[in-house]
Image: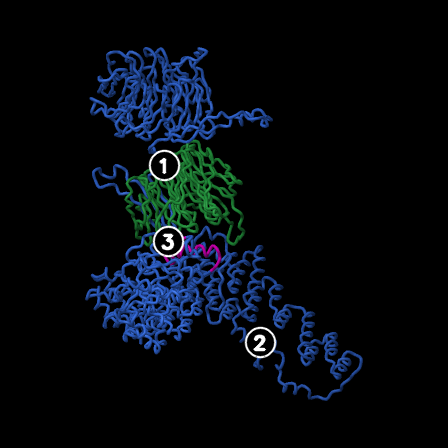
Chain colours: A green, B blue
Amino acid sequence: MVTVLNSIDTGHEDMIHDAETDFYGLRLATCSSDNSIKIYDIKNGAHTLLEDLKAHFGPVWQIAWSHPKFGNLLASCSYDRKVIIWKEQQGKWTKYYEYANHDSSVNSVQFAPPECGLALACGSSDGCISILTYHEETNTWDAKKIQNAHAIGCNAVSWSPAVTPEPAFGNDEEEKFVKRIVSGGCDNLVKIWQEDGDKWVEVNKLEVHSDWVRDVSWAPSIGISRHYIASCSQDRRVIIWTSEDCKTWNSSVMHTFDDVVWNVSWSLNGNILAVSGGDNKVSLWSQSSEGWNCISDVLKGQSTL
Amino acid sequence: MKVKDLERTANIAWSPSNEHPIYLAAGTAAQQVDASFNTNAVVEIYALNLSEPGLDMELKVSVQAEHRFHKLIWGSYDKSSDYGTIVGGCDGGLIEIYNVSKLLNNERGLVAHPTKHTGPVHALDFNPFQSNLLASGAGESEIYIWDLNNASTHMTPGVKSQPYEDVQCVAWNRQVQHILASTFPSKCVVWDLRKNEPIIKLSDTISRIRWKVVAWHPEVATQLCLASEEDQAPVVQLWDLRFATSPLKTLENHQRGILSIAWCQQDANLLVSCGKDNRIVCWNPNSNTPGGEVLSEVAKTNQWNFDVTWCPKNPALIACPNFDGHVSVYSVMGGKIQQVQTTNKIADSFPGMEGYAQAPEPQQTAPASVDLSKPPKWLKRPVGARFGFGGKLITFATETATQTAPNQSPTVRSVFVSQVITEPELVNQSAQLEQALEYGNFTEYCRNKADLLTDQHKRNIWYFLKANFEEDPRGEILNLLGYKKDEINNKLNEIVGSQANVDGLTDQPGSYENSFGLDQFGSLSQQVYQIKTGDDVEGLITQALLLGNLDAAVELCLKAQRFADAIIIAISGGSELLARTQYKYLQQSKGYVSSLISALVTKDWTSVINNCDIDSWKEALAATLTHSSNEDLPKLCELLGNRLEAEGKTNPKYSQDAQLCYICAGDFERLVNSWSNSIKKSSNELQELVELVTFLQKSVERQGRRVEITGSLADLLSYYASILASQGNLAVALSYLGSSQDKQVANLRERLSISLGYKSAYHQVPQRSRHSSRQSFSNYLNPVTPPVSIYNNNFNTVLPNTPINQPWQTQNQAPVPTQPFSPPPVVQPPRPTSVGSAHGGGISSRAKYVVDPSVHSNNPYGSRNQFNTNAYMPQNVPINQPPAATTTHPLVPNLPPMPNPTTFHNPLPPVNHFDEGEPAVPTFAPPPQSGWNDPPALRRSIPRLPPQPDYVQQDPITHPLYGTVPAQTVPPSNGFMEPIQGQQPFTPNTAYNPNFEHQPMQPPIQTTGFMPPPNPNVYNPIPNIQAPKTPTPAPVVESPAPIQKAPLSGEHKVMQIVFDDLRNRCSTNANNPQTKRKLEDVGKKLEFLYDLLRDDKLSPNTLSGLHQLVQLVQSGDYPNSISLHTQLVSGPDFAQIASFMPGLKVLIQCALQLQVYLR
């Protein structure tokens, strides 16, 4: 069951496009079409505005927090074709790095799992995906671009969790994991890319959706040896892709909704999926032996189940 | 950006929005003639194929048509299949109607071809609401409405408009289904089909306009756009039919006449137009920019684009046929065109050609990426949800226009934070487990649990666990195995008779010697006998005996199978001979009894375990339990368990029995492993296993062994903790994680601690701290206030007191008001400096403690010692570091007035744990003493104390523990030096140690560099204070925290005494960490109370209630005091008292439970 703990009036002047908490759940960042990003402190149920970052020239579509071991970094991507990484220093947030090498709106940004080092993937409407990696020795960022990832634009990117899922308790082998990302685009495809040497290659092209793929999300590893990816689309369906070895994927339609589905997000334990749909509805789904069931219907934050 | 390209001169139509995949139909254009004057007409259907790279579209089908087309449209009407209908307008008034599914099947697709019109049919449109209705326009102002169900007849929308002109375009309204617009070169007529007559005629008489195209607004029913192809007036005008005298807006950007416009159905702010100036422009027709707002110029071509249409399904695409023989599909989203490697395709067709030189890529300057200056609606995500740590769900949504009344206050854009609980059962059970652990009634819990279960094996498990908590675990387990000691002993006794020491014998295996008294020997040889020494066996034996050659005698006896004799002889021959003889005897004896005996003798039970039949495992276990030592028991049980498990592959019962052995052994790894793997699927099983494991942990600890959390146990606990965390029970989750160093566990623990605020999260990465973790009790005091800083300095000055609290605590000696001795120099006002920085600026003015990150790195108690007692470093640090001295220096000017209770609240109530029960109060009374003796408890700095940003950061310097710099930096003005030195003789060092013991669980508080607000008053008296100091080290050590603060006025003092005393007693009596923690919390709450008392903020009502409460507590009447408490809480002053009342309640309850009384 879902209970609303807190309702934060952000004061944004236009639509909010993303809201995310950091690693510890103590801070919240929101971004909006009013070109700004707001950061709040949400400890213990109260909320205080810490910072209002205005450096984009267009609506900011998505934000992502890094793992704290790299410092307090927040990445944002915007319609103005830029990806900005912000860093908190002494209580102030300043621009740490700016990447402006896309030809069109950057729609999605996500940090890699901390075991992969400090890296960031961004998907853009120009059809390309960039992977920015930070090199500590030289204190520089380098960018690798996947050209033509999706024909008329990439809408979402998501990293695979770093640890190879272990079959049960007690397996202590740590394999060298391969970096993988999944992306969804306006060509209705879900694609999986893998790092191979110094470039990225496409390893799977999953074609089931009949309209734009709005969001993809790779489930966090929960210790069972299976990968799950959720993708949602303009065609009102959410599809769950599963694989045991990351090579072949099986799909199943989780549900067909009444309106377009904008967003899918896995819980940190990887067993609940939050789905946000066009009619302002957010629902939670969880898997049982019979399939996926809706365990809650949260309408704009008010719980109904 | 051009996405696809076709080399055709054709009129095109997109497949409707409900069809998938997206097709593009192309019918040869009647307007053009190609070089060969070819008049062939084809209708082709191409698949858009966005997923394939490259500019080509895949041709699906191509059929010959009789005529070429002026216009082509694709509607979704289809009686039989989903592919819809293509309608083309041709010359000669001919309309061709094709059924697409038939076309795709390569059948004859033309289903109808009425020829009712006059002249070329230029205008066609499907009704968006009734897909069988088609409007067509041709010459002589003819407009016909067709019903595709019956294409032979048609109707008209009204009387043909005079003068007769060619109908350029028809368009159905997108909101109202019976409205149709039609354009003639000189006017635009809007028809109402219900009334069957025109309702409005639009014309612009001012400028010369030749209307070409009309497009309705997708959302507003009365608005439409008209485009003019007149080169002198190449405009697009937005009209609203309600004000039909003049256009609302005029979009002027084309240089020459406009040939076509299209309005995006998904985003009404996008209108695209193409014209004779070879450009395709995208506008926002709704904006108020004069002259029209151009969002982007989508393309500039070489020839006229004569048509432009939005793809209904994929709103980013527009298709534009061009007079230069191409149909291009553009994306309005920008991006650069990708050079397609056509060479690859060639290489595929001509194998072996790859080696040849590649044709040089035509060097084109990559066109600039073009996208709309404002994002289209379809990029804007209106709703979303994301999970956060601790089971939180963050959701946001957009208020739709209908929900907020216009003219009201601006739209509130909110984000909701919710808690998601999906495993309420688990949470409940976990809470019950917590409670049980706290109360400590393990045996009862186990028994209850066992009673509730039905599965015999599980019951056994719980009984075994329960046994572990009993007085005599081994005996209990033996009992469970079926060997009731008393019963069996009785039985044996009966059988054996009452002969001496039967019991004694069984309890002392191996003590063969002296089991028979000499007197018994004496009675043996009474008869007279001959001693023969022949060569027979007996004789030989006799010879050996007579000569004292016992070895030989023994050997002879053994050979003669006279084992008993051999052994008896061997006994007299020394232990080595005995051992050998035993060995030989046992080796040759058969039978299980002998094995047992041999094990008994050799104390080698492993052989029993290894060699007995697996069915006798119970006996083996019993044997082990009875005989093995405490060190060996776990190993042996584990061995047995292993065997059982190995056998368990064939017989599952054995693996269950193996679990029992593991329980006896206290072996977590195996136990967890042997539990079924369905833990992850069923939370019940998980809960059970965790309960088991927790209880086992407790029992193992009781036995004195330490439990290492590693391997499978670590995995299990971290999994469990992460589930609890995801349900929001962060604190409980943390309690399961202990202090294991297993990576996963440590990571999770770190995350939980920071999230709970036990540690501060946001440190400056590069800057100072060597550790990445800061342990400060951020919101220990106050949930909303930012982290607390602990001022470290005054270590010395409060030497006597310091031992009481952990060193870092000592810092804050509140300058007792005006009393000179008052807590020496320490007063630390909250120091926001570094703290502020550290905490993202969110520090409110109530920042009580500011954490100085620098201190962390130096803090010995720091990262390593989360819950440990090893913070002994201070011992080595010469306590007489005068950190205070040094730090006071810069503060001198900033000293707040003394009276300010600058005592810091002791964030670690544990400090009070040190108190051996003596109330703090006594030290209050004599002011001088209180000054020195006061444990430098951190006192909550009162808000009056403004942050002092100009404090110089003196990181290492002020660190009392590292006695490095401080000495040097003592400012001369600091009168402290002397007194501080003088403190050395103090015994605090020794005093420290015991105190440290008391706090196994205190997360170390950061010692921060801080400057005690130099209180001039404080300085002076220091020398004076010395004297009183000496006599009081002892009591000082004992006194608990609250001394620095201004003493409470008399009557309230009593309250303080009583409560503190009670709390201290409870905490010394409490035997588990949870209770201790609760009591620390209580201490904090008590501080709130004391502050309120000091400030006189409580109402008389409350005060009297509190005093009553105190009296009740003093008299030990807890039940009544709880009911009084409840009364108070439900009284009118709740707001005032809410900060400390819960603490009082917990205190009283603990006292009640622990049976602690003040007398």
Residue B69 position by quadrant: top left
Q: Position of residue B1019 (x, y in %)?
A: 30, 69
Tell me whether circle 2 and circle 1 mark residues in contact (CB < 8 Å). Answer: no
Q: With respect to residue A11, does B93 lie above or below? A: above
Q: Percent from the top left, x then y, of residue B865? A: 44, 63
Residue B455 shows up from this direction: yes
Residue B1075 in view in this figure: no
Q: In the rendered structure, the residue with mark 3 lies on which chain?
A: B
Instruction: Check residue B757 for magenta coloring.
Output: yes
Please tell me which residue is depicted at 46% across the width and 50% down the height of the picture.
Answer: B681
For disc 3, the marked residue is B728
- B216 lies above or below A235: above
**Three-letter residue code for mark 3:** Gly
Q: CA distance from mark 1 to mark 3?
A: 36 Å
Tags 1 and 3 both on a single chain: no
Q: Secondary structure at mark 3?
A: loop
Q: Label 2, label 1: how many angstroms apart (C-alpha)?
A: 87 Å
| Amino acid at pointer 2 | Thr
**Looking at the rendered structure, which numbered label has been put on residue B506?**
2
Q: Residue B531 sits in which quadrant?
A: bottom right
Q: Quadrant of the N terminus of chain B?
A: top left
Residue A136 is a magenta residue: no
Q: Give how far across and how far down residue B709 sits, in percent.
A: 48, 60
What residue sits right under mark 1 in the picture? Answer: A79
Which span of residues is magenta-colored?
B740-764
Nearest to N terminus: mark 3 or mark 2: 2
